[in-house]
Image (spheres, coloured by chain):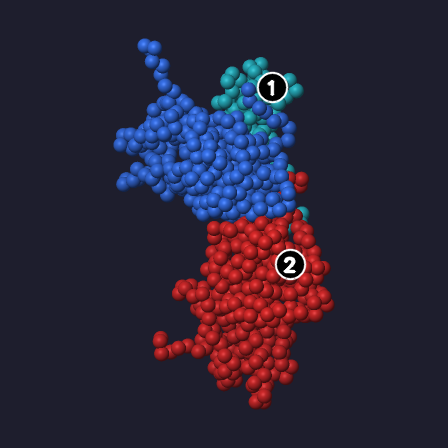
Chain colours: A cyan, B red, C blue
Amino acid sequence: MALRVGCAAPPGRALDNKTGAWRVFKPVFEPEKCTKCGMCAMVCPEGCVHETEEGTFEPDLDYCKGCGICVEICPKKGIRMEKEEK
Amino acid sequence: MLEFMEGSHAVAEIVKRCRPQVIAAYPITPQTHIVEDLAQMVANCEIDAEYITVESEFSALSACLGASAAGSRVYSATTSQGLALMFEVCFNAAGMRQPIVMTIANRSLGAPLSIWNDQQDSISLRDSGWLQYYAEDNQEAADLHMIAYRVCEDHDILLPAFVCFDGFILTHTYEPVALPSQEEVDAYLPAFAPYQRLDAEAPLSMGMYATPDYYMEFRYEIDRAMHRSKQAFIKAGREFGEQFGRDYSALVEGYRLEDADTALVAMGSICGTAKDAIDEMREHGRKVGLLKIRTYRPFPAQEIADALKGVSTVAVLDKNISLGNGGAVGTEVKSALYGSGAAVYDYIIALGGRDVRKRDIAAVVDLAEKGKGDMFYGLRTEVL
Amino acid sequence: MAEVEGGCELFSAGHRACGGCGPALAARLLLKATGKNVILVASTGCMEVFSTPYPETAWGVPWIHSLFENAAAVASGIEASLKRQGRSEKVVCVAGDGATFDIGVLCISGAFERGHDITYICYDNEAYMNTGIQRSAATPYGASTTTSPAGKCSPGNVLPKKDMPAILAAHGAPYVATASIAYPNDFVQKVERAINTPGPCYIQVHTPCCTGWGFESGETLAMAKLAIETGLWVNYELVNGQVEKAKKVRRKPVEEYLTKQKRFRHLFKPARRDDMIVNIQAVADANAERFGIDIKKKESSE
């Protein structure tokens, strides 16, 4: 692909980089505890926690780095970390 | 119609007619009259531009870069210490392919501090990716700005340019200059149409970083653009000649070179003195000529070699020194003439504003013809 | 109730920040405030590097990176250009503490003195993190960094944190605020206020760095909250130079914050440095006094 003048690029290509491969631990969301406050989605540094059709939340494991911030923030302790099975 | 005016004023008048939209400049001798004139023009609503009184030259070029990236034609001017302070931004601007035109009122670099002319400042940035054009007189200084904007903004080029004219010698002297009308300049230089810009309607990330997988190719692209700019300059210079009657289609220009045994090579206002000296030497039967370099970057190596074919002795007048290695222009001319068989000598001359007279030019020719060169010319040995 | 923006993120996943990165969260949050009609001007640093290795950019808005120290000058030029063109995009600088407190002071001072209509957001992780955790003028008293390390004859950084908000308020900035990713909605609201206040506005957002400060990645927001609860970070606003709305807390002793980070571990191991801890407590006490953050106990006799 030809270089873009000035080392410039249009949006979108970061999504090629599936940072989920970095994980050691992964978050497991328990929808039955969810009060739909949305804090997990707000504070994820990757922006990879998405709302489901039911209004609860789930992580996009293609990008989730397993940092655990969502676990700490959930007021209902509705997320736990588990060692990733490879 | 010719008008008698100061060089700085001629440049300001031309820059006004080039319709810059953002001017960001910091005052420094001997450029001050240019930026003052432009400020007055803005204050009188003669130019429709934002004038930013920046806090340093570093900020001046940074602001120009931002404004250019946002889609405006920009202008700045500096010299010497100010240009040195801009060093980092110069490389950045060329790498970001912003078509910035900046006047360099050539001045020596400290230490020791000197406000007087030589060409060390712009020459020291010869690696930066900026096009470099040198003016022999104030008419040329004015004209080269219009041509520079044309070349820089060409979507096939997209590089910034220095338009260099000698501090005090040209900036502060009065010469007759023909100023085109605004309509004439508009006909030559269309409105700025950026290749790409910062725009919420079409977002781009500009100035990303390049890993070793990409960096070399980006630099190669800049180099190629510089080489392409030779043809762009020739075309723009020829069209300038067709419209204004003053032809600039030559990257280098010979003066009485056709049958010369000895050729001087020089850039800038010293060429004027050299031409007068050559006329006198010719009257005494000496076959001397001058090759004036108008475009220093990209370096017109082939054009120099072609122009100096048949010349047996070449004396390069260097108003600069690459400390530890001699004059920059001399070194590059020697490289261009490698294998030609000519004897090429380099003379470090006129540093820090030391005056050059016709007899000095003749003395250099004498030295060259005697096989003495690669030296500082005219040292005051009594103070050493 | 949290505000959630589902769907297209203006700062996408796939960026290369460490897991748990405070600045990455700040990037997402500030874009919630600005929306699409913005031009971001970045400085060299963590956020620039983890978001734009050519050609993988995480940014969905116009973004430009020039050099380390000149974001404010580049922004000045962009602002002038947009004014000339009659365009409405907001111009927002995003730079780390190193770029802001140290090397960028020249350009920020000039931009703020000239009154350009820009917003400058400093994400403060209290050191030069991108280059490996070196001391900046934002590094707090007592912290160990690689260029102010704790050693046999040094207790780490002994210089105070530069008061950038006061410096920029002194330039006549109409709105200056500190914020923290611990209170994301507050940060978003402050960014909204800044971009809608004409003139140069400054926001300094506390963005703890798990890698540089030495704590578990999941603790980032907890650490930011503790900084506020101990008084070592104060969330406040300076409106035309006057302090308004400092966040009040029931203050905890600074030790609760210091023991949780490796960058302060030398204050406790191999031996307690009570002299240093007392000085750090004094910093927190002075902040409490200056900004009035202590929640007063009610008098029982009234």
Q: Alpha-carbon distance for marks 1 and 2?
A: 62 Å
In this orientation, which residue lies closer to the viewer: A46 or B322?
B322
* Same-chain status of marks 1 and 2: no
Residue at left offset 53%, top offset 70%? B173
Quadrant that contains the N terminus of chain C: top right
Which chain is mark 1 on?
Answer: A
Disc 1 vs disc 2: which is toward the camera?
2
Residue at left offset 53%, top offset 29%? C188
Residue position for label 2: B17
Q: Is residue C139 visible?
A: no
User: The disc labelled 1 sits on which kind of residue?
Assistant: Thr
Task: Using the image, determine if residue A47 lies above or below residue B18.
Answer: above
Quadrant that contains the C terminus of chain C: top left
Query: Quadrant of the rendered structure where residue C248 is?
Result: top left
Residue position for label 1: A56
Q: Position of residue A59 (x, y in %)?
A: 58, 25
Task: Using the image, determine if residue C260 lies above or below residue B331.
Answer: above
Which chain is mark 2 on?
Answer: B
In this orientation, which residue lies closer to the viewer: C30 or C53?
C30
Q: Position of residue C213 (x, y in %)?
A: 41, 34
User: The disc labelled 2 sits on which kind of residue?
Assistant: Arg
User: Residue extending furthest bottom?
Assistant: B284
Q: Is residue C58 visible?
A: yes
Image mark for residue B128: none
